[in-house]
Amino acid sequence: MPRFSRLTHCLATVSLALGITAPALAADFPSKPVNIVVPFNAGGSHDLLMRAFAPAFAKALDGNVIVSNMAGGSGTVAASTLAHDTPDGYKLGYWSVTVSTIQPQIKDLPYGEDSWTPICSVAASPTLLFVNAKSPFHTIDEAVAAIKAQPGRYIYGSSGPGTITQLASVAAFSGLGVLKDVRHLPFQGSGPALQGMAAGTIQFYGDTELLMQGGDFRPLLAFSDTRLADLPDVPTAREAGIEPPLDQLYLWGGLFAPAGLAADKRDALSKACGAAVASPEFQAFAERTRTVLHYRDAAAFDAFYRAQYSANAKLIDAAGL
């Protein structure tokens, strides 16, 4: 099934699950613009996503929504600031998995797991473990056998320490019992890392399905709950022998409010988020940009976020970060 068919199905499911075209909101909320803070510079993928999301979100809220940028500290400047803001529902952060669950566990930051009221997830893509398309490894079992036969020879790369690209490989090799037998080579960004993969400097790299567009890389396993429709022959991490919670690792983003937001405002924002994700305008943007949308309401996103925080703590420990 093509990616866009899966996306369309996902969004249709969102619409049916919500049973709404626009949520019913309390008469007094919002009475002023809702500000979505993007923790990176204007023009990046997170910024463009939220600027496409904002009009549909505003329509569902029957109010005004603005998007602002607060870059710095790999996203932590904005999160550190918003964590201590008034929890009134008028300022939300669009945080990635890295900003919300990884950075606060490897740096001394003024926010942590309990600093937020999760509102909704917007996008989520499972990570995969890749090799070069010319690699002799066609299955994860072949790769593990080679690693065990020659400990220390094989190298996995990442776009930097503490990134999801590193943790994907850590999850794979830790879960399969060979983490001590491989080496890590961090690069300064994904571009140099992919160049290293193409040149053979590194043999393994973790990223999302978008890495397959050029045909230069081959996935060995997917950190998803079921096999991906586009890649039916690629086993899930669980099928490969990786036990929970290390078997699911997603590159995701969602809306968060400071902890203490009133439940009625949380629910109103969450329902509006669902309506926005399911909107034809935002769906069209996602199709154009090959973004995989995944809406979770406030309760489901809270559970998902906390499970991810716990799972990533184990990966961070295994990686020695």
Image (tube, helix red, strand yellow):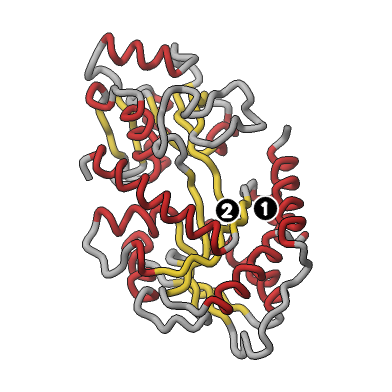
- Measured from the top left, where is residue 257 in percent x and y? 47, 73
Instruction: State the image quarter where residue 115 is shown.
Output: bottom left
The residue lying at 72 percent from left, 35 percent from top is: 2
Task: Give percent across and percent down for residue 236.
Answer: 52, 28
Q: Are marks 1 and 2 in contact (CB under 8 Å)?
A: yes
Q: Height in image: 279 above or below 215? A: below
**Figure quadrant of the C terminus:** top left
- Using the image, determine if residue 98 lies above or below residue 50: above
Q: Is residue 201 left or right of residue 135?
A: left
Earlier along the polypeptide chain: callout 1 or callout 2? 2
**Residue 271: horizontal and vertical position, in percent?**
65, 68
**Quadrant of the image for the N terminus?**
top right
Q: Quadrant of residue 185?
A: top left
Q: Amino acid at mark 2?
A: Ala
- State the residue position of label 1: 286
Locate residue 270, reporting x and y percent.
Answer: 60, 68
The tag on residue 119 is: none
Which of these two is toward me, 125 or 21? 21
Q: Nearer the viewer, residue 6 or 157?
A: 6
Q: Which residue is mark 2?
A: 123
Which dot, 1 or 2, sits closer to the camera?
A: 2
| Dot 2: element | strand
Q: Nearer the viewer, residue 21 or 26?
A: 26
Q: Is residue 281 visible?
A: no
